[in-house]
Amino acid sequence: MKIAQVAPLYESVPPKLYGGTERVVSYLTEELVRLGHDVTLYASGDSQTGARLRSICEKSLRLEGGKLLSPLAHHLNLIETVAQEADKYDLVHFHLDYLPFSQIRRLDIPAVTTLHGRLDIPDLYPLFREFDDMRLISISDAQRAPMPWASWLATVHHGLPADLHEPTFTKGDYLAFLGRISPEKRVDRAIEIARQVGMPLKVAAKIDEADRSYFESEISDLLVNSDVEFVGEIGEKDKTEFLGKAAALLFPIDWPEPFGLVMIEAMSCGTPVIAFRGGSVAEIIDDGVTGFVVESVEEAVEAWKKVPSLDRRGVHQRFLERFTSRTMCERYLEVYELGIAEKKRAALGKRGLSLAI
C-alpha cells in the first residue's frame, strides 16, 4: 500500500523529548515500513524515519527557538501540500485533529483521521456534525463518549515497539511521575500520595509556558522540604531506567484522558501503575494485574500496599499481549482496508447515479 502519514509539526517524529502524538506516529510509520509498505511521512525536517520524509518546516516548531507567533500557518501549509500530492497515495492518514477536514472532503482518495485529544469540548460538536463524512479513529472507546454519534470507523489503542524498553523485575525504590505539569495531570496528588506512603517521588515532566504560572503558584512550594526530586523533561532513552527502577508509576489525572501513553510505557518496563479513574484508564489498566484503578488519594495509598503482590513479569507480559506497535499497526491496516473499501463503494454509487441520470 502507498500510505501518507501526516504528523503535527510541533515536535519532530519521533520527538526529542515530550510528545505523545508524534511518538505514536513514529512507531506506526516504522512498523508499516518494516511490513513492506510504501510510506511517506509528512513532518518537520528534523524527523528521523525509515519512510520517505516530506518536510514542511526545517525544525519542529516547539524547539526551534524564539517565540513562534503563528504555528497555524505552518500547519495550513502542511495540509495544502498534502492535498496537492494526495493522488500519489492509496490512503492518507491524518493526525491533525479537525484541521484538514475541509481538504479531506475534496480528496479523491480515502483518508482517515486519528483524533488524539480530548473531545468533551462543546465547541467541537457543531463542527463534527457538519463534517459527518469524515472517517474517524479513536484511541480509546472512552474518548468517544462525548460524541458517540460521530463517524467512527474504529478504535485503535496506541502501541510501543516490543523491544523499546528493557523490563526491570526488581521491586524499585521510588515512585515515578512522568509527563507534563498541568492542572489536569495533578502532580500535587502524586506528591501527597508519596508523602503518605513514605516513598521518595521522582518527577520527570515538561512545563509548558502556558502552565508555568500554575507550576509556580501551586506546585513549586510543594517541592520544598519534601522527598521529591524534580528531574525535568526527559527523552525516550532515559525512560527505561526512570520507569524500570520505579516501584510504581503514579498517574493521578483529573480529566478524561484520551489514552495515556505513559501507562503502557511503564507496563513495558514491568512497572505497575496506580491510576485515577478517568477517560481511558480503566480500559488500559487491568486492575489487580498491571496496576490499580483508584478514585482518591486515600484509595491510592491503599493500592500502594498491594503493589508488592503484583507480578512485574506479568505486567510486562500483558503489555506484550495488548500494546505493542506491531499490534497497533496490524489494527490500523485493517482500518485502512475498511476505509479504502468504503471509498470504492461510494465511488461506485456515484458512478451508478451518474449513469442513471
Image (cartoon, rainbow, N blue to C red):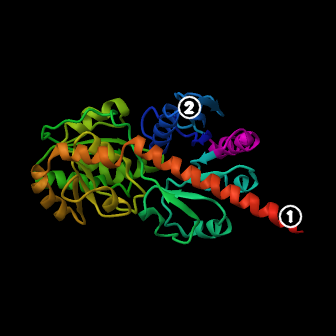
| Residue at image point 12% right, 61% down | 302
| Residue at image point 72% right, 52% down | 103
> Nearer the N terminus, badge 1 or badge 2?
2
Q: Quadrant of the C terminus?
A: bottom right
Residue 225 shows in the view: no
Residue 118 percent across, percent down from the top left: 48, 60
In which quarter of the view is residue 300 placed?
A: bottom left
Q: Which residue is mark 1?
A: 354
Residue 120 shows in the view: yes
Residue 113 in the figure: left or right of residue 103: left
Secondary structure of the residue carrying tag 2 is loop
Residue 195 percent across, percent down from the top left: 15, 52
Vertical relation: 245 (above or below) 262: above
Residue 307 in the figure: left or right of residue 320: left
Between 295 and 49, which is closer to the camera in this rendering? Answer: 49
Residue 349 percent across, percent down from the top left: 76, 64
Vertical relation: 56 (above or below) 73: above
Q: Quadrant of the N terminus?
A: top right
Of marks 1 and 2, the one in the foreground = 1
| Residue at image point 27% right, 45% down | 267
Instruction: Give the spatial CA distance, label 1 vs label 2.
Output: 51 Å
Is the residue marked by circle 1 packed among few (<14), some (14-19), or many (20+) residues within 10 Å?
few
- Magenta stretch in the rendered image: 69-91
Between 177 and 324, which is closer to the camera in this rendering? Answer: 324
Q: Which residue is mark 2?
A: 64
Q: Identify residue type, mark 1.
A: Ser
Q: Identify residue type, mark 2.
A: Glu
Residue 320 is inside the magenta segment: no
Residue 43 in the figure: left or right of residue 180: right
Residue 12 percent across, percent down from the top left: 52, 34
Would you say the magenta stretch is mainly helix, strand or loop? helix
